[in-house]
Image: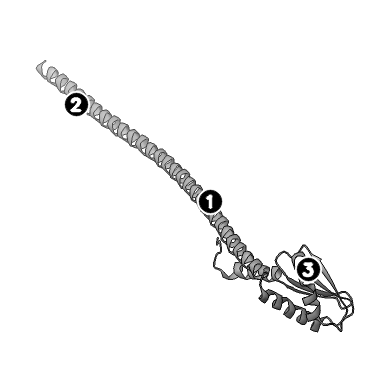
């Protein structure tokens, strides 16, 4: 009988030991599973956080680029407006000086030189000289400089705002513009190309 009890005890102990091993194994597997799941969840959370951060960074970069572009465009527009103001100031001042020049004897000499130059190129009977309305009092000086041997009609034009002279002949198909208005306009084109006051991209 004692031998049977001993076998039974050994059997029970073996079962308990097996059960303990199984419990330990199951607990270990459960812990491993739990840790893996936590790691997986953490990795997914990190991935989601990374994606979110990347999206936020992209949005921020887009917003910064848009803001820089707006600021650059505003600056360019401001520079362009200032450039136009400077041009207007320079040429308004030049126009005033030219208008002052038209009140001098040197201007009368300049008109006479223009009339002689035009006379050399317009050897026709239908020559017309055009003055500003302000200069009509100088028509005799201009006609004399053009030359008495040629027939010459003298007119005025409101289009000539500063001064100078235009000569034309329909039969020859020639128009010679010696006005201060045109010379100032040509200087304006030169100024735009050479002043360095350019708005660059």
Question: At x 52% / y 51%, what residue is drawn?
Answer: 69
- Which mark is drawn over residue 17? 2
On screen, residue 19 above or below 56:
above
Q: Name the residue under label 3.
A: 136
Q: Which residue lies furthest to the top in this view?
A: 1
Mark 1 in CB contact with mark 3 (< 8 angstroms):
no
Sequence-first disc among 2 and 3: 2
Whichever of labels 1 and 2 marks the residue nearer the N terminus, that label is 2
The residue to which callout 1 is attached is: 74
Residue at 66% x, 72% y: name it. Answer: 104
Q: Which of marks 1 and 3 is nearer the N terminus?
A: 1
Label 1 vs label 3: CA separation?
49 Å
Mark 3 lies on a secondary structure that is: helix
Badge 3 density bin: few <14, some 14–19, many ≥20, Cα 10 Å:
some
Residue 125 figure quarter = bottom right
> Badge 1, how many Cα within 10 Å: few under 14, some, many 20+?
few
> Tag on residue 119?
none
Find residue 199 and report its image quarter: bottom right
x, y (%) of residue 111? Answer: 73, 76
Report the Cα–Cα distance between label 2 and label 3. 132 Å
């Amino acid at each position: 009988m004692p031998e049977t009890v001993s076998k039974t005890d050994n059997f029970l102990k073996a079962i308990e030991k097996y059960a303990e091993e199984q419990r330990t194994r199951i607990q270990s597997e459960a812990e491993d599973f739990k840790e893996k799941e936590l790691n997986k969840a953490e990795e997914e959370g990190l991935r989601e956080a990374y994606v979110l951060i990347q999206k936020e960074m992209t949005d921020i970069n887009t917003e910064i680029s848009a803001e820089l572009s707006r600021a650059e465009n505003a600056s360019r527009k401001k520079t362009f407006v200032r450039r136009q103001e400077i041009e207007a100031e320079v040429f308004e001042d030049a126009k005033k000086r030219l208008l002052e020049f038209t009140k001098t004897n040197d201007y009368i000499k300049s008109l006479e030189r223009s009339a002689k130059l035009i006379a050399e190129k317009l050897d026709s009977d239908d020559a017309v000289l055009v003055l500003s309305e302000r200069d009509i009092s100088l028509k005799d000086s201009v006609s004399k400089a053009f030359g008495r041997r040629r027939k010459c009609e003298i007119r005025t034009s409101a289009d000539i705002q500063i001064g100078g002279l235009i000569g034309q002949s329909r039969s020859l198909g020639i128009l010679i513009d010696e006005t201060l208005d045109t010379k100032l306009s040509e200087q304006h084109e030169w100024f735009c190309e050479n002043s360095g006051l350019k708005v660059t991209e």
